[in-house]
Image (cartoon, helix red, strand yellow):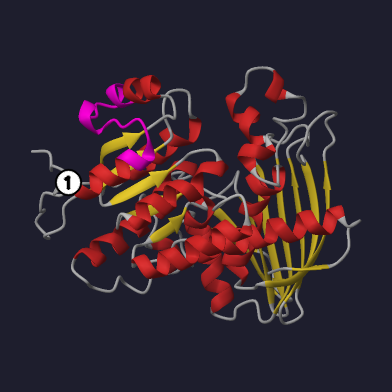
Amino acid sequence: MAIEAGQATEGGQGRIRLGMVGGGQGAFIGAVHRIAARLDDRYELVAGALSSDAERARASGAALGLDPERAYASFAEMAEREAARPDGIEAVSIVTPNHMHAPAARAFLQAGIHVICDKPLSVSVAEAEELVALGKTSGRIFALTHNYTGYPMIREARALVAAGELGTVRLVQMNYAQDWLSERAELSGSKQAEWRTDPERSGAGGAIGDIGTHAFNLGAFVSGLRPEALLAELTSFVEGRRLDDDVRVLLRYRGGAKGLLWASQVAVGNENTLRLQVYGTKGGLEWSQEDPNHLWFTRLGEPKQLLTRNGAGTGTASKRVSRVPPGHPEGYLEGFANIYGEVAEAILAARSGAVPDAAVTFPSVEDGLAGMRFIAAAVASSKAGSVWTPVG
């Protein structure tokens, strides 16, 4: 028998009642979030404001089997009405273009509803700071879906750094290269390209906000380091494009480590090439998103060691978020689902006033603020002629 949303299971924990803002017909990332939320059967999608167009919102709700009364024309109406229902949503997933993240998150936090928001957090540092403060006063969980932190071998890498296996971290290198904006796709009917290259909807950053923040967040998640200053060059290579499509950033971290970040959406031949390298006084790590089940770990003076997801030599940090035996690929959707799974643990603990297990980890609203400060500093540095600029 299927478990209804909120119905108690054997362990006293029913599915989490979930709503969604954005992600209607024709949207890519909304479908990804819905698959991720369903994968471990922890959530039930029961409401949505799936489009800013009322007719499309209703049609999208019908296609997903939502009760017509809970397919809302706006997120403001949804927040108000769901908060008033005894069976209203407990959490909302925000998967809109960037400029709507903060307004929607604000409405649901004020309604007492947990927030799971796509990145970047907002379009300005000021909005991000407001959301951090509101998140604290509301007492609600606020997660940001930097989904690459959900990969098991990224969890393994983070654990190795935290255990001191690399010694003192010296170098962090982050590359994220794509080629899908090598031409003006925003003029050829691509909905995804259209809003991502529009400053009014994307914010001050193009590639730096879309994929640069992923690379930056991944480096911080694994290394545990926070930058104190950066020097950036943001370029719009495609003629007529109003936002950057190629980003090069030097980073100075607190404590003396150095970083290098390159993000590009005009690197022909690259589909989704996200790579991370972390090097310390005793060892180094190398990981590629297109080969996510493998992590190269080298101790100084020893041969390279290949660690595999759920394989021999890995620890509890990666194994607790692995679903299948080694050799069976897990990837993008599972990594996304791990973020939803970690947030589910925190929400279920919050239901009873408990504290989630210490191993539960997911990007927070504070990580979103760090990302916005990174974008702002990079844009400022580039506009000033690529000068060293404080971060936050």
Secondary structure of the residue carrying numbered label 1: loop
Which residue does the image show at 55% across and 64% down from the upper left? 129
Left or right: where 182 falls relative to 317: right
Let me know if residue 368 appears in the view.
yes
Which residue does the image show at 30% across and 54% down from the upper left? 111
Q: Position of residue 379 (x, y in %)?
A: 77, 54
Which residue does the image show at 54% across and 79% down from the upper left? 163
Quadrant containing the C terminus is: bottom right
Residue 286 sits in quarter = bottom right
Q: Position of residue 196 (x, y in %)?
A: 64, 36
Let me know if residue 327 appears in the view.
no
Residue 62: within the magenta?
Answer: yes
**At label 1, which amino acid type do we have?**
Arg
Q: Is residue 118 above or below residue 387?
A: above
**Residue, disc 1:** 85
Give the extent of the magenta segment. Answer: 61-77
User: Mark 1, residues whose alpha carbon is within 10 Å: few (<14), some, or many (≥20)?
Assistant: few
Left or right: where 135 falls relative to 300: left
Q: Is residue 316 above or below residue 384?
A: below
Front-lying residue, 389 or 4: 389
Q: Is residue 235 above or below residue 13?
A: above
Q: Position of residue 338 (x, y in %)?
A: 40, 53
Q: Position of residue 288 (x, y in %)?
A: 63, 50
Residue 375 sits in quarter = bottom right
Front-lying residue, 199 or 350: 199
Which residue does the image show at 61% across and 38% down from the upper left? 201
Which residue, as the protein is rendered here, is positioned at the far right? 385
Front-lying residue, 182 or 47: 47
Task: Please state the total of marks drawn on the protein image.
Answer: 1
Left or right: where 194 falls relative to 82: right
Quadrant containing the N terminus is: top left
